[in-house]
Image (cartoon, rainbow, N blue to C red):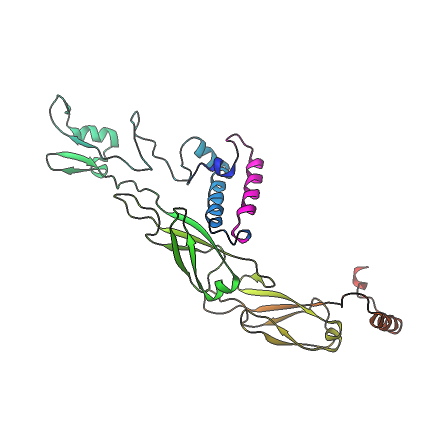
């Protein structure tokens, strides 16, 4: 990943407040929900989040500034005391040392194993392998490179419940068709093995997809339950009646009792989201009495007459 300060557009000496402000502006600007026609927005959004995880965290920021971790938050190899690690991307170059007497390419006095013991505190057998001719060669696979890729993907609530196949664009420019399983939850991470970056001599990294669920036009998610506001007319509230209620499946009819107040909540069992145990949550329906637009002289006259004959105070408990 690029330098996190560069990603967020702040200098290294920026205050925590400035970093937080920059992150919020960029996250809002590049959120996939606000850029549905831009296939690159998810990758940019993921990069912004990753950068904020480094410089937005006081301890990680100090570690990054000291060179202890890289832009992805992975520890950097600091090298042997007094030596030059010459590491590239977290890995080693291959070096071969041979035992022998004093002279060019050899070591006098104690054997090479003694030198390894002094360098690795007795870990020669673990840090090197013996080859033909008493040669020791460091194993380049001893320290793994971070070849994983992370992207974010946004799906609709209906797609999260039923599952969907969507195309995702990776930071490398590669595109994949990804099957999102039914019942996925917000923030859940899907791992696709071997779909990350590659490097010679190393196992391919994985692709980590973080699933976000886009806000629904009228359903609100509450764990495995759903909540929805149901507009009803004044006469439906007074006289009662049957009203059609939307669900994630087909609409159902709800019986509104007579004299139903605005804000009354009804529960429709099994009309929510799938649960981890194989069940289904519920749908909670809250009535909202909606009056007709504009002035209705007949309704106003009726209410004036009704008020004179049937006065009541619903706020008596508040005084």
In the picture, the quarter occupied by the N terminus is top left
In the picture, the quarter occupied by the C terminus is bottom right
Establish if 135 lies above or below 36.
Answer: above
Q: Of residues 271 and 216, which is closer to you in this image?
A: 216
Percent from the top left, x then y, of residue 155? Answer: 49, 59
Percent from the top left, x then y, of residue 291? Answer: 76, 67
Side of 73 where 202 appears, left or right: left
Percent from the top left, x then y, of residue 179? Answer: 40, 61
Magenta residues, dominant SS class: helix
Q: Of residues 217 and 228, which is closer to you in this image?
A: 217
Q: Residue at x 54, y 32 (%)?
A: 14
Whether residue 26 appears in magenta in the rendering, the answer is yes
Q: Of residues 264 and 93, which is closer to you in this image?
A: 93
Whether residue 13 appears in magenta in the rendering, the answer is yes
**Highlighted range, magenta:** 11-33
Q: Which residue is drawn at 56% across and 69% down?
A: 282
| Residue 167 occupies quadrant | bottom left
Q: Which residue is drawn at 30% across and 37% down?
A: 91
């Amino acid at each position: 990943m690029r330098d996190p300060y560069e990603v967020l557009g702040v200098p290294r000496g920026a205050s925590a407040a400035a970093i937080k402000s920059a992150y919020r502006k960029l996250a809002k600007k590049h959120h996939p929900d606000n850029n549905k026609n831009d296939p690159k927005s998810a990758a940019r959004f993921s990069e912004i989040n990753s950068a904020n995880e480094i410089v937005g965290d006081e301890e990680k920021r100090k570690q990054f500034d000291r060179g202890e971790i890289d832009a992805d938050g992975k520890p950097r190899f600091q090298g042997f005391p007094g030596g030059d690690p010459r590491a590239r991307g977290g890995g080693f170059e291959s070096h071969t040392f041979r035992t022998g007497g004093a002279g060019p390419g050899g070591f006098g006095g104690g054997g090479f194993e003694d030198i390894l013991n002094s360098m690795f505190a007795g870990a020669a057998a673990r840090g090197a392998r013996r080859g033909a001719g008493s040669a020791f060669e460091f194993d380049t696979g001893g320290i793994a490179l971070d070849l994983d890729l992370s992207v974010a993907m946004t799906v609709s609530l209906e797609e999260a419940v039923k599952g969907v196949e969507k195309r995702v664009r990776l930071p490398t420019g590669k595109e994949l068709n990804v099957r999102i399983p039914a019942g996925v939850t917000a923030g859940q991470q899907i791992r696709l093995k071997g779909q990350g970056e590659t490097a010679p001599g190393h196992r391919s990294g994985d692709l980590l997809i973080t699933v976000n669920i886009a806000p629904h036009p009228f359903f609100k998610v509450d764990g495995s339950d759903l909540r929805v506001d149901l507009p009803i007319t004044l006469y439906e509230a007074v006289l009662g009646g049957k009203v059609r209620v939307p669900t994630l499946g087909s609409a159902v009819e709800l019986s509104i009792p007579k004299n139903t107040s605005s804000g009354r909540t009804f529960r429709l069992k099994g009309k929510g989201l799938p649960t981890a145990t194989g069940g289904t949550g519920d749908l909670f329906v809250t009535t909202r009495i909606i009056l007709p637009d504009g002035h209705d002289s007949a309704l106003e006259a009726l209410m004036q007459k009704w008020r004179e004959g049937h006065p009541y105070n619903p706020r008596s408990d508040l005084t």
